[in-house]
């Protein structure tokens, strides 16, 4: 898939989080966004998700510019699966019903068809034994896997994952990263914000460094980590890879 930003600016008050950013990335499987906290990764992801609009500039996905009208953004959002850091699931619904709800309410499937598709994805993620449990009865890793299953059930063009493992302990992190790695092999395009550098290095086609108002560097994962070109990227990697 291909994402392109043309002169995109997004500010909150005087804070220009994305300042006239032009950028193009074409990748088969995974684009990883990394960078310091507050650098604008989530802001960029929300723009790509059609949850927010840039103040100026254009975003293109697979060559098609996102329109600004709420109606067209609503249709666009239906084609994307999104998973955020935590608290994604409706707490009062079972895992199955969490997957079923958007299929019925947003995508117009019958209840029977939605339930069948929900069981199919829950099976695929080894969650079928937990289908009737509410999120409170699941581990953090299982909850995020249900959230990913739900995002995938709508058969999205691509998935947007914003730090899907940052609220998890190492074992659960591995469990969720395994699922993402598996999606990669299934050819599901993914744009992922992550602090898991090992995972980014191993699984991303492209890594983009988001900081100081823009995308400072974007390169294939191998090159990005072995030979970062901008001083900002080098400094960031030195800092986080020190321990
Ligand atoms: N809705 C908002 N209102 C005001 N400021 C915001 C909002 N969302 C993000 N910001 C600010 O934009 C900057 C980038 O935030 P964010 O995109 O969340 O960074 P990251 O995900 O890289 O940590 C931060 O300074 C943050 O405080
Ligand atoms: Mg963020």
Image (cartoon, rainbow, N blue to C red):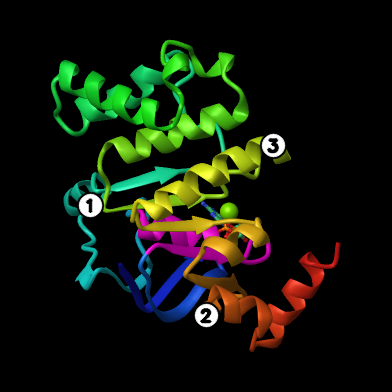
Between residue 47 and residue 155, name the one nearer to us. 155
Could you tell me residue 210's position as x and y percent? Answer: 57, 71
The span shown in magenta is: 29-49
Image vertical order of residue 166 relative to residue 96, above or below? below
Residue 104 lies in quadrant: top left
Residue drawn 58% across the image and 63% down it: 202
From the image, tell me which residue sits under label 3.
Answer: 171
**Image position of 234 (left or right of 221):** right
Instruction: From the image, state whether disc 3 or disc 2 is nearer to you.
Output: 3
Could you tell me residue 100's position as x and y percent? Answer: 29, 23
Between residue 154 and residue 222, name the one nearer to us. 222
Q: Residues within 10 Å of mark 1 (few under 14, many from 20)?
A: some
Q: Residues within 10 Å of mark 3 (few under 14, many from 20)?
A: few
From the image, tell me which residue sits under label 1.
Answer: 76
Decide whether residue 42 is among the magenta residues: yes
Instruction: From the image, state whether disc 3 or disc 1 is nearer to you.
Output: 3
Decide whether residue 243 is among the magenta residues: no
Between residue 183 and residue 23, name the one nearer to us. 183
Q: Earlier in the sequence, mark 2 or mark 1?
A: 1
Image vertical order of residue 180 relative to residue 20, above or below? above
Q: Label 3, label 2: how many angstroms apart (C-alpha)?
A: 29 Å
Image vertical order of residue 59 relative to residue 96, above or below? below
From the image, tell me which residue sits under label 2.
Answer: 219
């Amino acid at each position: 898939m291909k994402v392109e930003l043309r002169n995109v600016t997004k500010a909150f008050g005087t804070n220009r989080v994305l300042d006239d950013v032009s950028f193009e990335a074409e990748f088969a499987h995974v684009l990883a966004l990394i960078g310091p906290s507050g650098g604008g990764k989530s802001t960029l992801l929300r723009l790509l998700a059609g949850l927010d609009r840039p103040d100026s500039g254009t975003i293109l996905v697979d060559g098609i510019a996102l329109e600004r009208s709420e109606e067209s953004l609503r249709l666009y959002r239906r084609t994307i699966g999104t998973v955020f850091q935590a608290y994604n699931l409706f707490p009062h619904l079972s895992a199955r019903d969490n997957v079923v709800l958007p299929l019925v309410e947003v995508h117009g499937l019958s209840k029977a068809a939605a339930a069948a598709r929900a069981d199919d994805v829950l099976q695929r993620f080894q969650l079928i034994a937990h289908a009737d449990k509410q999120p409170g009865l699941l581990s953090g890793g299982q909850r995020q896997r249900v959230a990913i299953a739900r995002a995938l059930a709508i058969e999205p063009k691509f998935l947007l994952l914003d730090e899907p493992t940052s609220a998890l302990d190492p074992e659960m992190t591995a469990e969720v990263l395994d699922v993402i790695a598996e999606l990669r092999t299934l050819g599901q395009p993914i744009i992922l914000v992550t602090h898991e550098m090992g995972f980014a290095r191993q699984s991303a086609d492209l890594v983009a460094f988001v900081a100081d108002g823009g995308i400072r560097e974007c390169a294939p994962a191998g090159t990005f980590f072995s030979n970062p070109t901008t001083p900002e990227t080098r400094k960031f990697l030195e800092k986080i890879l020190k321990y």
